[in-house]
Image (cartoon, rainbow, N blue to C red):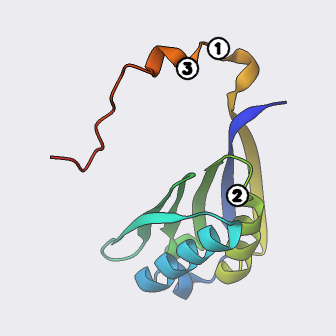
Amino acid sequence: MEQLGRHILVEMYNCDKEVLNDHALIEKYMCEAAEKSGATIVQSVFHMFNPWGVSGAVIIQESHLTIHTWPEYGYAAIDLFTCGDSVNPWVGFDYLKEMLKSDKTETTEVVRGETGRIRHFSHEKFDNIHFKPVDAE
C-alpha cells in the first residue's frame, strides 16, 4: 500500500520515573531518537510541568515526534509521525524504549495519506502559483 506517512502511537509503561521527570534528558532522548531514525530536526520545544511531567515536540522535516510523561505512573505517551521512505520511526521507538527503560509497550501504526484514496491532479496547476516562504517578510 502506498502511503505518505507512518504514524506510530506508543504507550510505554513501567518506565524509569526519574528519567520521565527530567526535562533535559527527555528532550535529548527525543532528539536522538529522531536522528537515529534518519530524520532531520528543524526545532524542538519541551515544557516541564509543576510538580512533575514533561511534554514536548521535535519537529522534523519529515513530520514530528511528540511525548507526554506521567512520572508518577511511570508512563509515557509518544507519537512518532514520519513521512517519506528515508526515515524509519521504529528505530526511534526501539531507542526510546531502551532509554526510558520501559518494560511494557503497546503500539499502533497508522497509515497516513494512503495514496490510493487521494484524488490525483496535475502539478501543472501549481506552476503559476508563487509560494511565499513562511519566514519571508
Q: Residue at x 48, y 14 (%)?
A: 125
Tell me: 67 left or right of 134.
Answer: right
Tell me if residue 72 comes above or below residue 43 in the rendering: below
Disc on the earlier residue, 1 or 2: 2
Tell me if residue 107 comes above or below residue 98 in the rendering: above
Q: Which mark is residue 123?
A: 3
The residue under label 2 is 87
Question: Residue 14's x, y, as percent?
Answer: 69, 74
Query: Disc 3 versus disc 2: distance between alpha carbons?
Result: 25 Å
Label 1 Cα crowd, 10 Å radius (few <14 / some 14-19 / many 20+): few
The local secondary structure at tag 1 comes to loop
Q: Nearer the viewer, mark 1 or mark 2?
A: 1
Question: Residue 58's x, y, as percent?
Answer: 48, 63
The residue under label 1 is 120
Q: Nearer the viewer, mark 3 or mark 1?
A: 3
Residue type at numbered disc 3 = His
Q: Nearer the viewer, mark 3 or mark 2?
A: 3
The local secondary structure at tag 2 comes to loop
Q: Which mark is residue 85?
A: none
Residue type at numbered disc 2 = Val
